[in-house]
Image: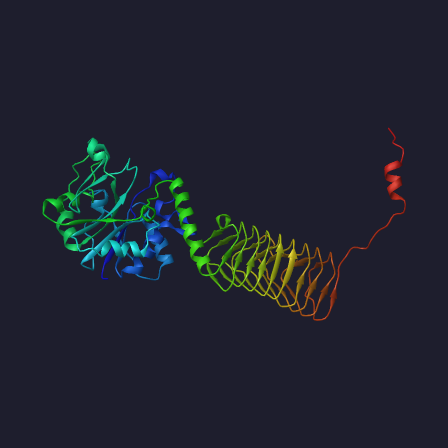
Amino acid sequence: MSISVVILAAGQGTRMKSDTPKVLHKISGQAMLFYAIDAALEVSDDVTVVVYHQKERIIQEIQKNYKQTINFHIQDVANFPGTGGAMRDLSIKHKKVVILNGDMPLVTKDSIEALASGDGDINMSVIKLNNPSGYGRVAIKKGYVQEIIEEKDCNEAQKTIQSVNAGVYALKRKILESFIPKLTNDNAQKEYYLTDIIKMAVSKGKTINPVYVKEEEFKGVNSKLDLANAEIIMQNRIKEALMHKGVIMRLPHTIYIDSRATFEGEVILENGVSIEGKSHIGSSHIKTNSVVEESILINSTIGPMARIRPQSYLIDTHIGNFVEVKKSTLKGVKAGHLSYLGDSTIDEGTNIGAGVITCNYDGKNKYETVIGKNVFVGSDTQLIAPLIIEDDVLIGAGSTITQNISKGELAISRAPLKRVQNFFYKFFHQKQTS
């Protein structure tokens, strides 16, 4: 299907009460605008984003995240404010164009194609609501849209209309070229409204087909409450798709999964798990209340209550409760409990005892710890980076290791044990003197 897509993303979004542009607020790990862009790129090779408020920031974020060519059109708000003004002087490649809103993150490829497939001069998205209060009504006669009536302008009969405007359109390019220059701002807001094209098209005998769409997909996000509700829907979509592909989830409503995360093999996610960023989980078991951030896990078990921080790569590894791993590569490692492993590379057969930490930061710089194969690190050991521990090493519990350890060695550092006989009795039973 040869269609162009225009995404309106110029609004300030004052109801969000935030310095962040509305369309850059995140849902399941990425800006809500990106979901509209993703859906558009599935159906079109000509995608334009209309920007104005904080335009530099929005353009920068899009260019940072997309290799595909995205066109940008800066809205001339000073002279032509409003949704109609946003469409002025646009360069459109194909004969049919779909107009989306950047604050509708739940729209899908299928819905865009359904909207664009009609043969009317304009295909207009319509939602049927049991309670249409607050929405502009869509008057339909003999199967065609006649007009959009704002609620404040409705008479009593019109208020009973259950069809409302969902705000997304597919129309012929020549309609835009003909009617956009004729729009006026003769209204209370002094703005140029895209919806006025409907009235103009009807007056010229053009056909406006109503296309009934799912309310869920065309929900606009205008507040932090809307943002939270959209995230719930998006999370349900993500988790349902993954469970159909074989991922096991315990109490899925308690689990958070980033939309960019990927899974393969048999993965088990227990309750309270968070998978964030572009993580990849393969044939692994993530236990209760564990967090995985922007990392790769293969054939491993994590948790409960463990944290895998960004840029970690774990294969054939067991990470137990209250263990934190950061920017580390672990292959065939066991770290059962209460440890911090940062900026480290640890090889197979190595066991990390309880309370072990890599001291990787001196207040200015981060340093690496390299641990070889079959190393046993005793409990409560501090490994002071930069440090290399070769294969087949034993490190005694309670040690502070500040030097490289060679293959096959035992390393132990402890202060001499001091013992004072009968000190307990002297301390607690000596006479108190004034």
Q: Position of residue 229 (x, y in %)?
A: 40, 43
Does residue 161 lie above or below 261 as drawn?
above
The colour style of the image is rainbow
Q: Is residue 259 visible?
A: no
What percent of the width, then of the height, locates residue 283?
A: 53, 63
Vertical relation: 409 (above or below) 62: below
Q: In the rendered image, which quarter is residue 129 located in?
A: top left
Q: Position of residue 360 (x, y in %)?
A: 61, 57
Q: Position of residue 387 (x, y in %)?
A: 64, 63
At 61% from the left and 66% from the top, the residue drawn is 332
Q: Foreground: 337 or 339?
A: 337
Q: Residue at x 31, y 59 (%)?
A: 41
Which of 70 and 214 lies nearest the eye of the viewer?
Answer: 214
The image quadrant of residue 109 is bottom left
Looking at the picture, tell me which residue is in the foreground, 242 or 333. 242
Q: Is residue 160 visible?
A: yes
For the view shown, which residue lies furthest in the top direction? 434
Q: How many marks?
A: 0
In the displayed structure image, the side of residue 119 where residue 332 appears, left or right = right
Outermost residue on the left side: it is 204
On screen, residue 334 versus residue 290, left or right, reads right
Position of 96 with respect to 408 (left or right) is left
Q: Residue at x 82, y 53 (%)?
A: 417
Q: Quadrant of the C terminus?
A: top right
Which corner quadrant holds the N terminus?
bottom left
